[in-house]
Image: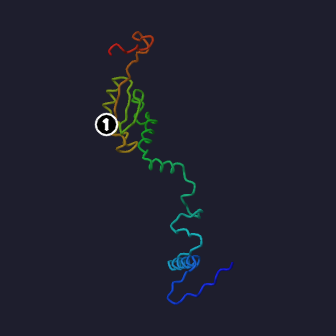
Amino acid sequence: MRPEPQNPPQPGEPVDTPPAEVARAALNRARAAARAKGLRPGSPARRSPLAEPRVSGAGPSARDPQLLSDVVGRLLRDKGWRAEVSVGGVMGRWREVVGDQVAEHCTPETFEDKVLVVRASSTAWATQVRLLVPTLLRRLAEEIGEGVVDEVKVLGPAGPGFGRGPRSVRGGRGPRDTWG
């Protein structure tokens, strides 16, 4: 079967344009508008001049190998770990920071919330170190910076344990149901 020939449209009658032609005309209008803006439709996207180049040139770039100390320093700064790491360095060099005599009888235990906890070997040394706290704070400020350690808490020796000796109980501490 053959399609019937259509009568030409009369003036003033609406014309049925095939959908393919409508789409082609819309695409051509969009391309012309893009060219007017300076864009090139259909060609690969151009990189922004502000974007970092893919290949390093003759000068230094972020893609070049970095010194480990620079990378670690940047990591510590970005994560906010500088204070903890510097206090850890002081704890590792405790003898150099406080001197041999004090280091023999006093050891750092913890650092948390700007408070350095130090344990002395005897109550006499705990008292002595408490008297030295202002000097110790000044020395720590010289080593790691002002405001990193605000307080030094001095503890005496740990009390004796009752796991052995004349006051120990075999079999553990008992059922613990005497008082309710």
State the SS at label 1. helix
The amino acid type, in three-letter code, at marker 1 is: Pro
Q: Nearer the viewer, residue 144 or 27?
A: 27
Instruction: Kindly identify the residue that appears in the image at 53 percent across and 75 percent down.
Output: 39
Quadrant of image for the C terminus = top left
The residue furthest right is 1
Q: Nearer the viewer, residue 83 or 106?
A: 83
Q: Quadrant of residue 136?
A: top left
Q: Residue furthest top?
A: 166
Q: Return the x and y of residue 60 as percentages of the image width and height.
A: 55, 61
User: Residue, x 32% and y 33% (percent of image)?
Assistant: 132
Residue 105: give x, y in percent of width and height: 40, 26
- The residue depicted at 43 percent of the width and 42 percent of the height is 86
Location of the N terminus (image quadrant): bottom right
Residue 83, image quadrant: top left
Q: Can you give x and y, in whole percent of width and height, for residue 35 in the image?
A: 53, 79
The colouring scheme, among rainbow, by chain, secondary structure or one colour, is: rainbow
Residue positioned most to the bottom: 11
x, y percent for residue 41: 56, 74
Q: Could you tell whether 54 is left or right of 180 in the image?
A: right
Counting labels gives 1
Mark 1 sits on what residue? Answer: 134
